[in-house]
Amino acid sequence: MTLDDAEAFAVAAGWPRFRGEQIWRWVHDKGARTFDEMTNLAPAVRAELATRAVIGCLTVAEVQTSKDGTRKLRLVTRDGFSIETVLIPGADKVTQCISSQVGCAVDCQFCATAKLGLKRNLDAGEIVDQVYLGRRLLAEAEPDKRISNLVYMGMGEPLHNYENLVTSLRILTHDKGAKLAQRRITVSTSGLVPKLEKLGAEDVRPNLAVSLNAPNDAVRDEIMPINRKWNIGKLLAALKAYPLEQRRRITFEYVLLAGVNDSLSDAAQLARLLRGFKCKLNIIPYNPHPEAVYARPTSAVVEAFQNECKRLGMSTYLRIPRGDDIDAACGQLANRSNGSPVVPLRVRKGPPPPPPVE
Ligand code: SAH
Ligand code: SF4
């Protein structure tokens, strides 16, 4: 529910409108997961509320912690699907990576999520609940740390789930709710051109990351079939027209695949392509997973590629793999546990179970 929905819910229940806001703030600002925590509501109201509504829509099925401190949470939806979210600690901040879909339909050849296919979109509640469960876990495990940055880079293609993406952004950035700063949120996309144009016209403005991954159409066609629909020319034209906030830059993600897109001439083509763009390049050495045929380039090749990009004037970052020992790094999210086979996406068949008893 958005704040408006919660107010309408209160009115429909025969309560004053402001009660909707009270309840909404408890959930989104204070992180309440039971009605009993809502101490400014009379006990009778809380009891009635519990007959009309539930809080939260995901349950934590499993938490894995990497050697480097990264935590991966496997979360289960009411209808039994598993999704994943990852908490990545940095020197002075924690970044949370969230999922937008169960699986993904885009079929990038190097990505583990692609192999799951698309099962369904997450609704806005399931997107935001990942953040609240992540916050909760961190508060228990490391109370001195807070999640400061949010990236939509988990399972799924956020722009394929456009309405829920935008609703989740509105909820998470609401100044009466979770209060996340727009400049600390990044949406990553494989490049759905019409939806990029639509996003540019919204009142919420997250940062944008675009999975480019290739210096030309021939390579991109091969590794990202979506390029056959919206090629690099169309993608870059849409991005040129994207209304960037002042001082912000588009991030281009570039997964380095040995022998595919990692040569010095690839770097030169890339530099030509992106000349004049307000952008930065995020180089991601390929993270292996069993279903893909690719390999990670040696660190010498990675370094040479990055140096060439820098020499040609690009501002580049090297994304060091985080949590790869628990399959939590970029492109590895596929409901795998301790290296064991994929946990079935759907662990339960049939209608949604009753709400959990707190
Ligand atoms: N669907 C969105 C967001 C999720 S993927 C998108 O594609 O942008 C997040 C990032 O992980 C993308 O930049 C993608 O290119 C990268 N990625 C996918 N598989 C990878 C792998 N095996 N190794 C490294 N990065 C990978
Ligand atoms: Fe989907 Fe992104 Fe993976 Fe491509 S890289 S299959 S768009 S999750």
Image (spheres, rainbow, N blue to C red):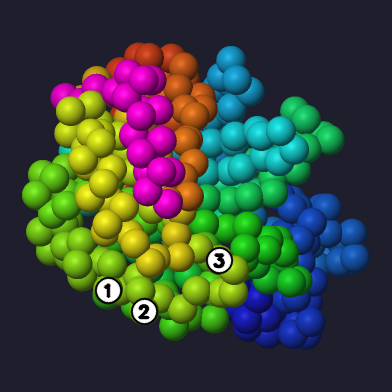
The kind of residue on which mark 3 rests is Arg
Left or right of residue 214: residue 153: right
First reached walking from the N terminus: tag 3 or tag 1 = 1
First reached walking from the N terminus: tag 2 or tag 3 = 2
Residue 304 lies in the magenta-colored region: yes
Residue 305 lies in the magenta-colored region: yes
Which of the numbered marks, if any, corresponds to residue 177? none
Report the magenta stretch's main SS: helix
* Residue located beneath label 2 in the image: 241
Q: Is residue 147 above or below residue 195?
A: above
User: What's the magenta region?
Assistant: 293-313
* Residue located beneath label 3 in the image: 248
Element type where label 2 sits in the image: loop
Residue at screen point 84% across, 35% down: 144
Left or right of residue 177: residue 210: left
* Residue located beneath label 1 in the image: 237
Locate residue 87, reporting x and y percent. Answer: 59, 36
- Answer yes or no: is residue 153 visible: no
Q: Quick one: 170 or 110, which is closer to the camera?
A: 110
Locate residue 63, reporting x and y percent. Answer: 57, 26
Locate residue 291, reporting x and y percent. Answer: 20, 25
Q: Quick one: 202 or 7, which is closer to the camera?
A: 202
The kind of residue on which mark 2 rests is Ala
The kind of residue on which mark 1 rests is Ala
How many marks the image carries: the answer is 3
Q: CA distance from mark 3 to mark 1?
A: 18 Å
